[in-house]
Image: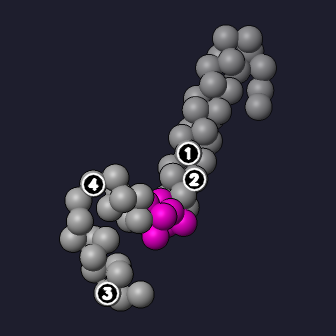
Amino acid sequence: MGQKREVTYTKKGPSFFYVYIVENFTEYLFVFLVFLWAFVVKWEYRFFTRRSVLFGTSI
């Protein structure tokens, strides 16, 4: 397993990126979900505050 990983990492190309992405997929997914959640919450907050200002409604 260790030797195979070294070979795949030293070789550049699509297979290199594929192996790298597969091995770090869970970490990237977690970070992406955190950023997405923060962005959605921020956007919704901004949208609701704008709507409350426009229509005079409270959250």
Which residue is under mark 4?
Answer: 13
Local secondary structure at mark 4: loop
The CA distance from mark 4 to mark 3 is 18 Å
Which residue is under mark 1?
Answer: 36
- Residue 3's label in the rendered image is 3
Mark 4 or mark 3: which comes first in sequence?
3
Tell me: residue 57, above or below residue 40: above
Tell me: residue 46, above or below residue 40: above
At 21% from the left edge and 71% from the top edge, which residue is drawn? 10
Mark 2 or mark 3: which comes first in sequence?
3
In magenta, the rendered stretch is 21-28
Neighbor class of circle 4 (other Cα within 10 Å; few <14, some 14-19, many 20+) is few
The CA distance from mark 4 to mark 2 is 27 Å
- Rendered image quadrant of residue 24: bottom left
Q: Is residue 55 highlighted in magenta?
A: no
Marks 1 and 2: in contact by CB < 8 Å? yes
Neighbor class of circle 1 (other Cα within 10 Å; few <14, some 14-19, many 20+) is few
Which residue is under mark 2?
Answer: 33
Camera-side residue: 10 or 57? Answer: 10
Of badges 2 and 3, nearer the viewer stands 3
Of badges 4 and 2, nearer the viewer stands 4
Tell me: residue 17, above or below residue 44: below
